[in-house]
Image: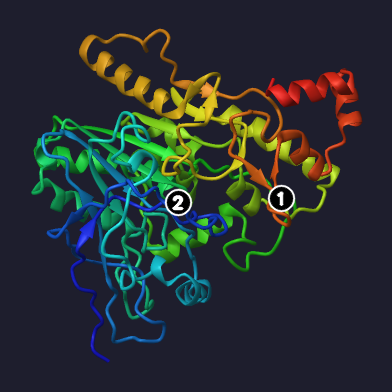
Amino acid sequence: MAPELCPPLNLGAPVLGPVAGTALIPPPAPAQRLRPRLRAWVDPRARPAGALGCSAPAPGNQAASSRPGSYYLKESKGSRRWLLFLEGGWYCFNRENCNTRYDTMRRLMSSNEWPLTKTGTGILSSQPEENPHWWNANMVFIPYCSSDVWSGASSKSEKSEYAFMGALIIQEVIKELVGKGLSNAKVLLLAGSSAGGTGVLLNVDRVAEQLEEMGYQGIQVRGLADSGWFLDNKQYRRTDCIDTITCAPTEAIRRGIRYWNGIVPERCRVQFKEGEEWNCFFGYKIYPTLRCPVFVVQWLFDEAQLTVDNVHLTGQPVQEGQWLYIQNLGRELRNTLKDVAASFAPACLSHEIITRNHWTDIQVKGTSLPRALHCWDRSLHESNKNGKAPLKGCPIHLIDSCPWPHCNPSCPTIRDQFTGQEMNVIQFLMHMGFDVQKMAQQQGLEPSKLLGMLSSGS
């Protein structure tokens, strides 16, 4: 059979809303309808990223070549700021679950059915009211089709009918963008959600080094990792490593990095023994080794983390052991972020945020995420200019301290999965089997006082 190659894409708006899934989670909720006044951007010059391919031709088609990876571009003439976004969406780590992935989530392995244009939401929106500080930047959306958490450096071979080239696709896109104006950039923000968020941690220093080697030392490279800061903690209930969901993250990545020929930053790799490079996929382990500044956005009760930890909130009341596990997860995650200079961690049960339409609504200690990112941007500018500490009244280290999921009143709305009705925090906790009387006793409070605190988000 002749190779199947997808034609150059007639590309447009940066992106999607919401972005597809994660390297570690179930598929997302259906995309919300975009407001009619959002503009769609079209750039007829956009093209596949060199000759580098997505993961898959059809399984068993040894003669077919993998389809090219591509990107979407919205140019902003006169702007010297660039935002590159890495999409998320699961991963696969052996032939069996890659075959299943190809059959059930083909757009995450082949560019053949990608739309010609996309519309940006959240931090990729061109509307100032939705994206107050980055609306006029040059936007690049790189779809996720390599299935390797943006780490692979392996072309299709006789041993594997799949290609895993995530890290190489990023490098190729950077090369092409230099000719489209990136060479004049002042700031490049490499952002991503979920698997893309982990991809930011794995690639931000490599992008900076690539640009330096190309002679563009003046470009300030930064990272924004959304919902990609996972823990290698003990699962609530251990299961055999059969597929992406049942396999513990440490084991899945351990197998995957071999299957993908995955690469990790050298500064992290040398911290671990040979064969232990999988450690670098976990944020709290790779973060101390990074040279580039990175802003970490992470829900304290991330749905993806709970899924791989085998805590499944299916509408049935949770058991006491599950409830304690959930609370402990929040404490553990909060602890790993204590030394992260720039972070935003709401005590919510959710996953992904920066490309959501409602991303401006979430607050931690009275500060919204766009405001915190703006403060971070200013602090980096000021520190580069004067060596000053972060600005007063402009916080960038924002972590909720309340102990329960959705104890932050600005958390995204939760709906009963059976009735579709919205639930407030008290209804949500009772829905999960939360015993107000018992919890109040544990906290040394009257039940009415505890309910009042929950209602106010205290």
Residue 417 point in image, percent of width and height? 69, 54
Which residue is most to the bottom? 1
Q: Extreme front residue here? A: 36
The residue lying toward the viewer, choosing from 178 and 404, is 404
Give the residue displayed 63% in from the left and 53% down from the top.
Answer: 308
Residue at x 41% of width, y 82% of height: 59
Residue at image coords 52%, 36%? 298
Is label 1 in contact with label 2 (beta carbons under 8 Å)? no
Q: Residue at x 52, y 31 (%)?
A: 362
52 left or right, relative to 123: left
Q: How many marks can you see? A: 2
Callout 1 amino acid: Asp
Quadrant where the N terminus is found in the figure:
bottom left
Q: Earlier in the sequence, mark 1 or mark 2?
A: 2
Give the SS element for disc 1.
loop
Residue 416 numbered mark, or none = 1
In the picture shown, does residue 319 fall above or below 219? below
User: Is residue 307 visible in this depiction of the protein?
Assistant: yes
- Which residue position holds label 2? 18
